[in-house]
Amino acid sequence: MSDYLKQEDYAEPQCLLCGPDPQSKEASITRIPIGRVIEKLDDYFAKNDLAGAERHLRYWEKEALEGGDDRGRYTVCNELMGLLRKLGRRDEALSYAEHTLALAEKLGLTQNVTGATALLNAGTVFKAFGEAAKGLPLFERARAIYEAQLSPDDARLAGLWNNMALTLTDLGRYEEAGALYDKAIALTARTPGMQGDAAISLLNKANLMEARDGLLDGDEAIGDCLEKAEALLNDPALPRDGYHAFVCEKCAPTFGYYGRFAFSRELEERAAKIYAGT
């Protein structure tokens, strides 16, 4: 699925026996088929077709706007800010982050998990473009909601902890960041199919150790993180799907940076084969 949203983040319970009051404001809204929108988006990501993903999201953003579907637009804008971050389009990504937060306020979502998703996503965008200090309060608000309202085994917690730790690392708060990486690694490593996410957090922790201790003093601990991450990425139980290809692409540069050139190339080749369907 997309980086950000699970079905429970966008689906609303509906009465199966009754429709909206024809006199209500709800009756005038044309809802976009958000479940199908996300499903098709995942298809684009599985092929690494980011241009297609953007066209898809832009189309449905327009449809939601014209239909008065603020909740559908909120979901699409959440995805757009993440995609624009991946594409490195700073001004647009930051604009969509602000816009999505405003929609969350308008929809009254800021105190629940659905709204916390926008806080997490926006915090990630701010961090990606050098605005870690601005992103941290958003992570703190999202963390309070996630940890209070989600099950302790919910994988969304690991995503929050990992991205918040990246921001804390940028701000030089290494001990707090390390503790959050450890929480994320413990959760994802024991969750079937999420070994790749655990590997990402291990590589991020290696980068933290370099920033804190330097390459020489941190060499042994960094090497331990790399070994564990490689083992997780090679787990035969891990599905070799589009998400695994994304993880491989994300991890390959870090292995190369630390001199693990052969495994870096292997990950790049693995991702290319998956995207090509071979």
Image (cartoon, rainbow, N blue to C red):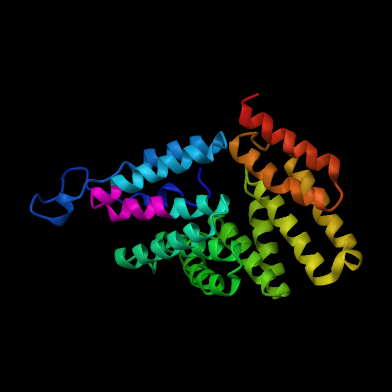
Q: Position of residue 71 (x, y in %)?
A: 31, 54
Camera-side residue of 232 and 88 = 88
From the image, which quarter does the C terminus lie in? top right
Residue at 85% x, 39% y is 262
Examine the image and state in which quarter residue 183 appears: bottom right
Magenta stretch encompasses residue 255: no
Residue found farthest to the top:
278
Q: Tell me: 91 left or right of 262.
A: left
Tell me: 240 left or right of 231: left
Q: Is residue 70 magenta?
A: yes
Image: magenta residue range: 64-77
Q: Residue 232 appears at what percent x and percent y?
A: 74, 45
Residue 36's spot in the image, x, y percent?
Answer: 38, 38
Q: Is residue 185 left or right of residue 132?
A: right
Q: Residue at x 84, y 70 (%)?
A: 213
Residue 226 shows in the view: yes
Where 243 falls versus 144 (above or below)?
A: above
Q: Measuring 41% from the left and 40% from the top, which residue is drawn there?
A: 56
